[in-house]
């Protein structure tokens, strides 16, 4: 007998409760859930970007080419480590997402944070490039899982009418984490690069509070009880009517994330390798890279709220399309011709503003899936895009041996198919324009 097609009715959710309309009416449990998700995302941003900031100098040290950061071998190994991180992120999203759908959001959140905190800290003791690659892969498992869980917690506990603004606030957590990483890098610029990874242990200290104070969302608990005898399986993501959502979301995420991570990984390397900086000390070049990251991420925080405002006006789908096309245009304008490093700062601000599109993904994707496939579906689709981004990083590593600028210019065009496929997706249910 064949497996019956999955229908939304087969995955019941509890009866919706009356949503609050004022901030002061938010319950203590909702505040705790929101704080846990925001802190988790903040530490995601911290731990994911520590390697980006020290990639080429640290890898050069590990493979015996210290102070020769432009060597093609350094770029190749640095891109391999980054690709392993992105692959781990993808696997972690699916693995921990499934765990969260089975054992609960709060419990799974604790496991993800401990995983990426401990494994990021281990980067400080890496003696070879492949050891660092293993540690980054393991850290990424936790980071990928935390993204999916944090997004589901907020989409299930906070008012649906506020989703665009919730997405902006949640994405700002990542941005704050990246800025903390950049600040740590700035003040540690004269120390050996490996010490930066010790900063990544900090998230481990919040898990006790999360485990004690953060309840499971009522929506998850009710749906789990109602569907106890007919729990959905991972394979249901690829059966009607969910299959179309899964495939389209995979394509959008793969294109957008490949382009986005190409920028985040290579723009700092491009800046530090510019000819006019050849006489600068390594510490000064590192500080400049840290400042550039601050500029991009500072603009990205503003971009999160601009994206939310656009989504309120034209709804999610068109907001994502507009911002993907804008991201493409700003990367093209910034890297279409060689420029002095002083001429890049306006481009950094413009690109950062466009990065608010990823804040919209946070609240847009989970509600597209049935409740008991929500964390699994959103986590798998968003984080599967990391596999494409990882492959793109490997390919761009070869291209980077020719010209960093060419990598950045080419990557920007991937936002065009991302925008095209986003047009085919629906608006999430219960959404208010």
Image (cartoon, rainbow, N blue to C red):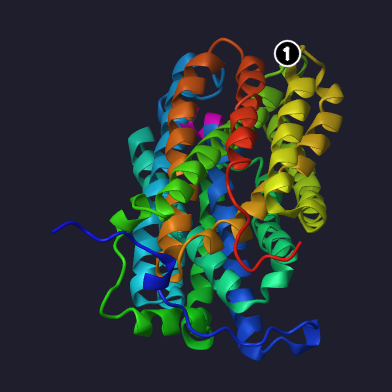
Quadrant for residue 112, please give it.
bottom left
Q: Which x, y percent locates residue 311?
A: 76, 54
Q: Is residue 230 visible?
A: yes
Note whether 6 is above or below 392 in the view shown: below
Please provide percent x and percent y for residue 89.
43, 48
Above or below, comparing residue 205 to residue 20 in the picture: above
Magenta: main secondary structure equals: helix
Side of 246 where 362 appears, left or right:
right
Name which residue lies at 59% across and 30% down. 417
Q: Which residue is mark 1?
A: 275
**x then y, percent, for residue 64:** 42, 24
Question: Which quarter shows the N terminus?
Answer: bottom left
Which of the two residues, 256 or 293, is positioned nearer the viewer here? 256
Say which of 402 and 385 sits in front.
385
Which region of the structure is painted magenta?
Answer: 56-60
Q: Please state, as top left, top right, bottom left or bottom right, where the C terminus lies in the image.
A: bottom right
Name which residue lies at 59% across and 37% down. 256
């Amino acid at each position: 007998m064949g497996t019956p097609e999955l229908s939304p009715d087969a995955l019941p959710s509890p009866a919706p409760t009356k949503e609050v309309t004022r901030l002061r009416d938010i319950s203590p449990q909702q505040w705790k859930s929101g704080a846990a998700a925001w802190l988790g995302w903040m530490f995601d941003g911290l731990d994911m970007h520590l390697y980006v900031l020290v990639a080429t100098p640290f890898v050069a040290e590990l493979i015996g080419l210290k102070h020769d950061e432009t060597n093609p071998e350094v770029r190749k190994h640095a891109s391999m480590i980054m690709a392993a991180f992105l692959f781990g992120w993808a696997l972690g999203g699916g693995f921990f997402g499934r765990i969260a759908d089975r054992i609960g959001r709060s419990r799974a959140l604790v496991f993800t944070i401990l995983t990426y905190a401990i494994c990021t800290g281990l980067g400080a003791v890496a003696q070879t490039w492949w050891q660092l690659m293993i540690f980054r892969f393991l850290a990424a498992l936790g980071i990928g899982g935390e993204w999916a869980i944090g997004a589901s917690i907020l989409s299930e506990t906070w008012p649906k009418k506020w989703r665009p603004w919730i997405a902006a606030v949640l994405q700002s957590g990542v941005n704050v984490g990246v800025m903390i990483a950049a600040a740590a890098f700035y003040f540690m610029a004269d120390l050996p690069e490996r010490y930066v990874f010790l900063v990544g242990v900090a998230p481990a200290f919040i898990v006790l509070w999360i485990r004690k104070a953060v309840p499971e969302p009522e929506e998850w608990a009710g749906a789990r009880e109602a569907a106890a005898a007919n729990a959905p399986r991972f394979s249901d993501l690829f059966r009607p009517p969910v299959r179309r959502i899964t495939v389209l979301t995979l394509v959008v995420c793969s294109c957008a994330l490949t382009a986005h991570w190409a920028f985040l990984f290579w723009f700092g390397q491009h800046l530090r390798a510019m000819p006019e900086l050849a006489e600068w000390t390594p510490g000064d070049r590192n500080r400049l890279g840290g400042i550039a990251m601050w500029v991009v991420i500072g603009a990205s925080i503003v971009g999160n709220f601009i994206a939310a405002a656009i989504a309120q006006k034209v709804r999610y789908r068109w907001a994502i399309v507009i911002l993907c096309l804008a991201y493409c245009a700003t990367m093209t304008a910034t890297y279409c011709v060689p420029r002095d490093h002083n001429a890049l700062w306006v481009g950094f601000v413009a690109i950062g503003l466009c990065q608010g599109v990823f804040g919209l993904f946070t609240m847009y994707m989970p509600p597209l899936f049935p409740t008991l496939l929500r964390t699994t579906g959103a986590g798998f689709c968003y984080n599967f895009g990391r596999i494409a981004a990882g492959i793109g990083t490997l390919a761009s590593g070869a291209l980077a041996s020719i010209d960093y600028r060419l990598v950045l210019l080419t990557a920007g065009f991937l936002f065009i198919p991302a925008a095209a496929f986003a047009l085919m997706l629906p608006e999430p249910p219960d959404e208010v324009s």
